Image (cartoon, rainbow, N blue to C red):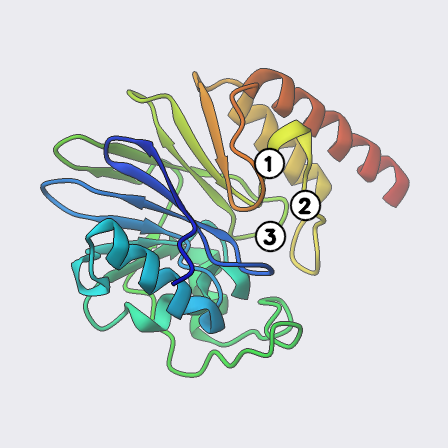
Amino acid sequence: MRLMYEKIKDSLYKIKTERPSCTSYLILDDQKNILIDPGLYQKYPILKENLEEIGVSPEDIDIVLNTHEHADHIGANKYFQNYSMIMAHRYAATKIIYQDKEILHCRGNDHDLNGYEVHSWLENNSVIELDDWFIRTIYTPGHTSGCVCFYEPRKRLLFTGDTVFARGKISDTGTSGSYGEYINSLSILRTLKVDMILPGHGSISSKVDEDINEAIDNASKRRERSL
């Protein structure tokens, strides 16, 4: 068994499912259980093993949240969509539903998006309120047009997907992003009260202000080089 999970807080777990798949986050709540970014389709067996070791079956997941539309984040949606509500920003949802394979990075990940569903479209400031969790959607285009971060203001946690990583690293803009939008999105994140960044790849960061400021600098430099 490939156990690759870490308990972050009492009801929050970080689960790794091997590269190039993303990091998944499991939120347990008496009302509903949430999984953020289930990762690549091919890595689902690892995710399932770790969920079960934590004490949760895949059928116990009520909501799957996608930070954006790339295959390394949404590929395993297909294993949950018959009993979980799949939620993504409307721009991401459109590309998933209509199988925009080039933008979704399907070819590079040997992935077929036939039969994928998104049950609920998220907008900026969409909120999921549970017994112990209050999750607010922050629309953060830049890496892709459908990127969002998930913000828990009471716990001061920010799930950033591929928008910003530890040490101020950022993603490229691929075929559906913009460095101008990226800078604006990072500037919005800088206004939030956050103690911990939980990214889609790499280490968790508690140097939030430093990392976001460095990310803005990095995005600005890339924008200048692209002009």
Cα separation between marks 3 and 2:
9 Å
| Picture residue at 43% right of the left edge, 16% below the top | 193
**Residue 113 left/right relative to 155:** right
Dot 3 lies on which element?
loop
- First in residue order: circle 3 vs circle 1: 3
Q: Quadrant of the N terminus?
A: bottom left
The residue indicated by pointer 2 is: 171
- First in residue order: circle 3 vs circle 2: 3
Badge 1 amino acid: Val
Cα separation between marks 3 and 1:
13 Å
The residue indicated by pointer 1 is: 164
User: Closest to the observer: 17 or 145?
Assistant: 17
Res. 13 image quadrant: top left
Q: Position of residue 202 (x, y in %)?
A: 58, 41
Q: Is residue 163 above or below residue 119?
A: above
Q: Nearer the viewer, mark 3 or mark 1?
A: 1
